[in-house]
Amino acid sequence: MTVFGMVLVSIPDSTLPIPKLRDIKIDGHLEEVWDSALTFTDFKQQYPEFNGEAPYPTTAKIFYTDKALYVAFVCEGRRPVLQRGKRGSLSPDNVQIELDPYDGSGRRYYRFFADPFGNRADVEVNSGLFNSQWDTEWDAAGTLTEDGYIVEMRIPFKAFRYRRGTVWGIAFDRGTGDGYSLRTPLNRRGIFPDMHRVRLSPPLSWALSLMPYGTYRRDSLYNPWIAGYDRLERFYFGGDIRLTVEDNFAHLTVKPDFSNVESDPYYINVSRYRYYLQERRPFFTHDRDLFTPNFNDFLPYMPLLYTRNIGMDEYGNEIPITFGLKGGVSIRGANLALLTVRTDSNQMWSLLRTNYRNENIALGSFFGRYTGQHPYPDLLNPGNFLSVKDTNILADLDFTFNYGYLQGGAVLMHADYYDELSGWRSGWSKAFGFGYSSQEWDVGVSYSQIDSLFYAERITFMPAAGSRDMSFTLHRTLYNVWKFNYVGLGMDLGMGREQGEPYSKYVSPSLGLGFGQGHRIYMDASLGDAYSYDPFRDTLVHYLSRDVSLSSLFNVNANYWSLWFSAGNLYNYATGELGNYTTVSLNLPWRFSEFVRLSNSLRVWMYPGLAPTYSNIMRLTLSVGNIATARMGWEKVVEHPDALVGIYDRVWVFLSFERGLTGLYISLNAKLYPTDTLNLNPITYRKADYIFGVKLKGYLRI
């Protein structure tokens, strides 16, 4: 049931007109103009009781002007949990609009979140792949009422890309601190969410955004090649210029750095593959969807572009970027995107991506070329590097289809790699999958094959070169049974192998439970016949693979506690040993007031051939309104049995003063090494790595 103005109309499959009204002030109080907005009251439970009646009355309203979309939520029946913080930090009681300004299919859309305290967040979504690092400028305000709250949003047309002359899609969500998720329309399709189809006539919009910044960094990092410290002090200016005309854009960056002088997380890697690190630089996170492959639930994900390769070598050292230029053009559902980047060390990336999408199919191609100097350790002179010329070329063709609950697709990649040490190498990567996916059923099959010679690591991220994998998936979700809100039962069957190995085979049952108000438990196990070839030791390892994992989420007074546990058999490539492994991760957040939050994360690694390793991370967040935030943390990593001497302690302080996308950021990140001998005084340290940075970032949109 949908409400337009004050008239009830029941047209769930029709295209609804969004009225064009006048601009208003966003203050959390509804003016008379909202009485003429397109209004929705038919919210249902998306979780925990799928399609259950909404426990709290909720109303969403929308209209537009020549400048912006206006959205309002009236949320009754529950007072919100107080919380304030920096951009992206939301109260558990929040609302969101999902907006597909392309074709209304839900294949490519934006999500805008807000809560009654003025906190906001935004996400860009492409075929189920979330880009939470995407940021744009828009407004939201809220007020508390006797039994709930009101939120108003103003989303300028200049804040996002869109396509005129097409049907748009919208959906509205409300989350509550006691674990309910309410939505209109109810999402039955999963990765391509159901949306109300709407009509409007947005203006021919353009925006010019200027983002200058200045950064000062002082680093003192231990260099194992010289058994000493590298000290570097830098002060440099950079900036981004971005021009957007509806779904077309051009973006120039000069001297970008790695986000707001933050550092990457600590991890232990015992596999044969490198570790994936998150991208946080605005130049690469904006319009990221245009350089991702078409994807759905059953097509194995094959990344095209791994931007953390750009501006960083394989040892984690930053290589300054001289400039980057990115642009995109959209014509009748077809997109053309270009990217070129050059670093101070004369590395060059040139990338071209084309893609065509309509409501049911997507067809894309990609071509990338990298040229540059590859630093290679000089084994005869430790601490020195050889400069080796190398070239990477990657070509891709990918296709997906979506007809209701039926999904599928295929990917074909070819890579060429050349360097002065090994000459030319090339290989293929192939993948396909198809199946049926709804809120209740997931049934499908997938296959992927990567040649052992597939090599273009300066462009893409290929975690398993030289492999073949096939899997069959069957999952059924039952609602309101056995006094649970839902019970999910699943079975996965698969086989795969690396180059030169026999086939490994596995069977993996799973059980998912949802109950109460926000409590979830997911358990799965795997039993198989596993082979693993270690090329460094020229050894084939054969073992019975027995793995089990448990993940859970519990809502305790609107604080979500999480536990993740896994155990089983593992071949450790770092030590060449086969044995049992155990990993545990526990996160305990707590909200003391609307301004103070504390969380503690404990992780334990127990891998064959390695001493048990413990990591404890404590974070304290202090907020002053929605402008100033201080985050303080302490991380201790300890290897047993020398429990009194850690691998390191790390302390950090991060201060931010933000107004929209403009801000001042101050960071100190110090890694403290204890003395080599056992010392009962934990304050005594002999060495320390540190990174200190200050960044001032501006934002101006014309």
Image (cartoon, grey):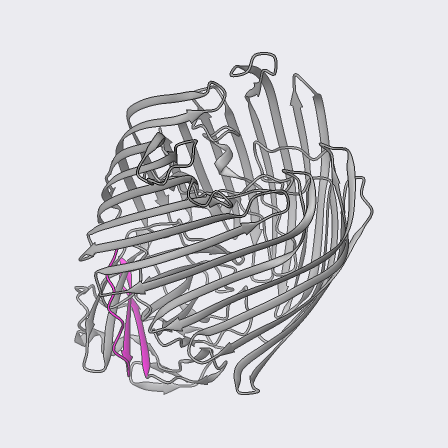
Q: Is residue 263 above or below residue 103?
A: above
Residue 301 percent across, percent down from the top left:
61, 51
Residue 400 percent across, percent down from the top left:
64, 56
Relative side of 593 to 549, left or right: left
Which quarter of the figure is the N terminus placed in?
A: bottom left
Relative side of 323 to 426, left or right: left
Check if residue 568 falls in the magenta segment. no
Residue 438 shows in this picture: no
**203 or 320, which is in the foreground?**
320
Residue depicted at x 27% and y 55%: 138
Residue 557 percent across, percent down from the top left:
33, 74
Which quarter of the figure is the C terminus placed in?
A: top left
Residue placed furthest toward the right: 502
**The quarter of the displayed image where residue 100 is located:** bottom left
Residue 695 shows in this picture: yes
**657 or 106, which is in the foreground?**
657
Relative side of 33 to 429, left or right: left
Q: Is residue 209 above or below residue 54?
A: above
**202 or 537, which is in the foreground?**
537
